[in-house]
Image (cartoon, rainbow, N blue to C red):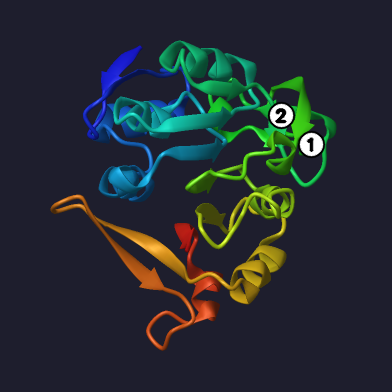
Amino acid sequence: MDIALATGVTIDYDETDLKEHKRLSNYAFYSPSVEFYLKEEKDNLNKVIIVGAGVGIYSKYLDSQGVETINIEPVEDRFNKLEANLENATNYNKACSDSSGTGTMYYFDDAKSGAKLDIDFGDNSESVDIITVDSLDITDADLIVIDANGKEYEVLQGSAASITPSNKVIVKWNTDICESKDELALYLQNSLATCSILHWDSTDNSITKKELGTAQYPWDLLSVVSDADILME
């Protein structure tokens, strides 16, 4: 089903995915803090790697602005829509973690956007090859976006050579599904990068950065933040 997004592009999405359908049909966006950050930063981006690309919501906008995207999506049905939405992008039907190999994606048929790697749940599953970001040998990405349904820390571990002082990373923080929450929090805290929660203002779609490790936003705030997109720069 095609839908016009708030960022100004039209995308074919999976209307049978209840979470995705509710967000897109009601609001015309999926994750506004990321989508409008990308819109603000488009002129500073030439190449972006997106782990957990889904049907291409982020990538479709970037593509419309002439930004090259490398998209990694493990679920075959969602990957097929990604391919249709972004015919000229580099797309991988793979899962992503801290080492290469094979695994299984588990999901509910009405919630494939919530598929998890090697966590047995749901009513369906499919085999998948696993890669690391580093295995792509991309050293000139301006930004890496990681939304891996709980595997964010593992993906970061497999991206060590791809993350440099000259690029940025957006990593999903979700206390309900993150499999290595403590390790991820420590990774962020020990990083040499400045880490900020991206805050979306619904009145004008502007983005502000709430820097972690400050008096106003101390690191222990993460223990009570259930869902956020964290920028490392």
Nearer to the camera, 151 or 146: 146
Compared with residue 50, is residue 162 higher up or lower down, i.e. above or below? below
- Which residue is at a point 59% across and 73% down the rendered structure image? 192
Position of residue 75 measured from the top left corner of the image (x, y, whole percent):
63, 22
Say what amino acid the circle numbered 2 marks. Answer: Tyr
Is 220 located above or below residue 2 in the figure?
A: below
Residues marked 1 and 2 touching at CB (< 8 Å): yes
Residue that lies at the very extreme toward the right in this rendered image? 101
Q: Tell me: residue 212, above or below residue 205.
A: below
* Residue ranking furthest to the left: 203
Disc 2 designates what residue?
A: 106
Along the viewing direction, whichever of 26 and 217 lies nearer the viewer? 217
Which residue is pictured at 60% across the width and 27% down the height?
73
Q: Position of residue 70 (x, y in %)?
A: 54, 31
Residue 19 seen in the figure:
no
Q: Quadrant of residue 127?
A: top right
Q: Quadrant of residue 32?
A: top left
Task: Tell me, for residue 118, which label it has, or none.
Answer: 1
The kind of residue on which mark 1 rests is Asp
Q: Quadrant of the N terminus?
A: top left
* Cα distance between the residues tagged 1 and 2: 7 Å
Q: Residue pushed farthest bottom?
A: 215
In this rendering, position of residue 146 left or right of residue 203: right
Residue 171: percent from the left, percent from the top? 53, 53
Nearest the camera: 59 or 13? 59
Image position of 1 with respect to 139: above or below: above
**SS for dot 1:** loop
